[in-house]
Image (cartoon, helix red, strand yellow):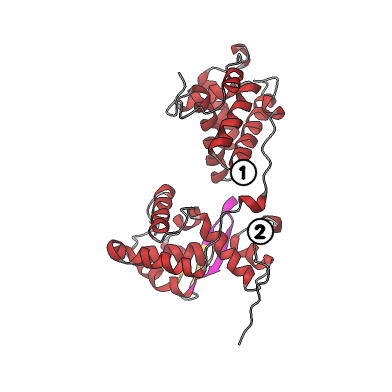
Amino acid sequence: MRSSKLRRTSGATLALATGAAPALATVPPEADAASEATAWLDAKRSPATRRSYLGDLLDFGRWILGDRKAPVAVAVRATAAATLPQIAAYRDDSMTRHRPATTARRLAAIRAWFRFLQARQIRADNPAAFVEAPRVNLDEQKRPALELSDLRRLIEVATTGRRAKYADRNLAIVHLLGGIGLRSAELLALRPCDYDRNTQTIVVKGKRQQTRRLDLPTAAIAPLCQLADATPGDARIFAFTRERLRQLVTTWQRLAGLPQTGTHTFRRTMATLHFDHGGSAEQLRRTFGHADLRTTSRYDTRREGTAIVTI
């Protein structure tokens, strides 16, 4: 029986979701489904893309099974045997739990998975192609940026009281995320060899294994130097997981009385302040490591009426 927490759709939608799956002859055995999914994911260049697609695929498969702890092979087989009514019901349920952008992204991953299964002649159809994704208003979906006063309050709560013991680490995190807009994965990949004391710059390894050299915010130099000196050999300077980083940041946000929006808020904040102070999109594109200026333009949330006067 499906958990009520997993299924919040109407009775009519639930009835649709029980539609018969394709004949088992058209779906690979569990072991083959897992290997097919591995081949599909390995074709993606970016590790972040592979993680995202796998997460979306497992969320769908486990939703079908009503078991959030279903083994990967079992969940993958469930997705390979999914029907159009099941995909539509999953979309409707996802809309009750997530933003439209999240639901649209997951449907895109499911469609890509079925295109791969078609190309491999494992499925003759792509039922996901007929399921409409929710409309996404980019302006409405943008997470709110922080103000400079918010960043100062975050720094205060992250470096005082019980967190004073980790003041250097926490201060470096805030300035690297909010000062030059590092992605969480880029921050966590930093090693002592990436820090150049002579030029006070860091080498950042971004998506598609591309590297870029960025100037350090002045306030980040001293704490990062301390951390780099204390890090042995080629170990990571920030030796914890992305989930742990997210927990740290959301804790600081909660203590500072701010929306708990995670690490990407820093990147959007940096972009907003950059544009508000007359910065160019091309300069931000290079700083953020975007391949396409159109991606950078999504961060352009400059506020009307903003005027900067140098006195």
Q: Crowding at label 1, few (<14), some or many (≥20) Cα neighbours within 10 Å?
A: some
Secondary element under disc 1, as helix, strand or loop, is helix
Q: Which residues are magenta?
A: 204-217
Please name the amino acid that badge 2 sits on: Thr
Q: CA distance from mark 2 to mark 1?
A: 17 Å
Q: Nearer the viewer, residue 4 or 296?
A: 4
Q: Crowding at label 2, few (<14), some or many (≥20) Cα neighbours within 10 Å?
A: some
**Residue 162: horizontal and vertical position, in percent?**
28, 61
Q: Quadrant of the N terminus?
A: top left
Q: Nearer the viewer, residue 33 or 183?
A: 183
Q: Is residue 44 left or right of residue 149?
A: right
Magenta-colored stretch includes residue 251: no
Identify residue for label 1: 101
Please tell me which residue is depicted at 63% across the width and 39% down the height of the picture.
104
Name above or below for residue 254 compared with residue 277.
above
Q: Quadrant of the C terminus?
A: bottom right
Number of the label disc, if any, that sits on residue 296: 2
Q: Is residue 179 left or right of residue 132?
A: left
**Residue 264: horizontal and vertical position, in percent?**
52, 55
Q: Quadrant of residue 248?
A: bottom left
